Image (cartoon, rainbow, N blue to C red):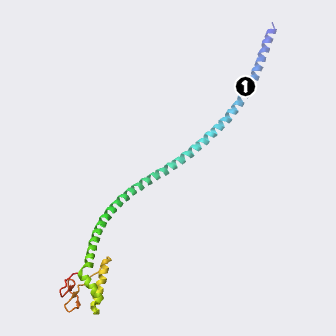
Amino acid sequence: MQSRPVFINTFTIAACVLLAVLSGFYFVNLKKIEREFNSKKVLLVKENVDFKYRIEAIQDTLNKKTESFDIVEKEKTLLEEKIESLKRENEEVIKSYKKDIAVIKKKNSILRKKIFTLENSPVIKRIKEASVTEENENIKQVLEEAAAKIEMIKEGKHINLAPIVVTKGGSLTQGSGGVFVSEGMEGVIL
């Protein structure tokens, strides 16, 4: 019977040694797994930090672009408002110029009719003929000046006409109110 307690003691010691070896092996294995876990944890933490930096950089870029976009949108809105304002002003100017052009065309038409009437008036024809055929230098000079003024009127230039009077003796004098031609000629006021 003594062999039984020795056997149990031996078995117990062998079991304890085996448990101690297994515990040591398990502890070494656990340390190895822990080191691998820690190295993977370090890599993951590093990647996490890198991702955070990337996310912050992307967020900063996005914020800057958003700000730029907002500025561009504001400028676009201001430019569109200016364009609309300029369109309204342009339309008003065009309306104003159309009115002015219509008035100028009417005045131009009236002036052309007056010029045509003056050119075809018997008095002007006689003045032109007389300036060519007249021998008296004073009369010829006055007639040439009158013809020159008529040409200036045709060209649309402004002139001040002094009244001219032709008397019965054939001499020209300046009178008040226009040109008067005697001996059956009509009196014309210029």
- Quarter of image, res 44: top right
Q: What residue type is labelled 1?
A: Tyr
- Percent position (x, y) of residue 25? 75, 25
Specify whether 125 is left or right of 43.
left
Q: What's the residue at 46%, 50% (across, down)?
A: 70
Q: What's the residue at 30%, 82% (across, down)?
A: 149
- Percent position (x, y) of residue 109? 28, 70
Q: Is mark 1 on a helix, strand or loop?
A: helix
Q: In this view, does 157 lie above or below 95?
A: below
Specify whether 59 is left or right of 111.
right
Specify whether 55 is left or right of 87.
right
Q: In which quarter of the image is the C terminus?
A: bottom left
Q: Name the residue under label 1.
A: 26
- Percent position (x, y) of residue 142? 28, 88
Q: Is residue 160 above or below residue 42?
A: below
> 10 Å neighbourhood of mark 1: few (<14), some, or many (≥20)?
few
Question: Between residues 103 and 132, which one lies in front from this camera angle?
Answer: 132
- Percent position (x, y) of residue 100? 30, 66
Q: In which quarter of the image is the N terminus?
A: top right
Question: Between residues 23 and 112, which one lies in front from this camera angle?
Answer: 112
Q: In this view, does 10 lie above or below 27?
A: above
Question: Between residues 108 and 94, which one lies in front from this camera angle?
Answer: 108
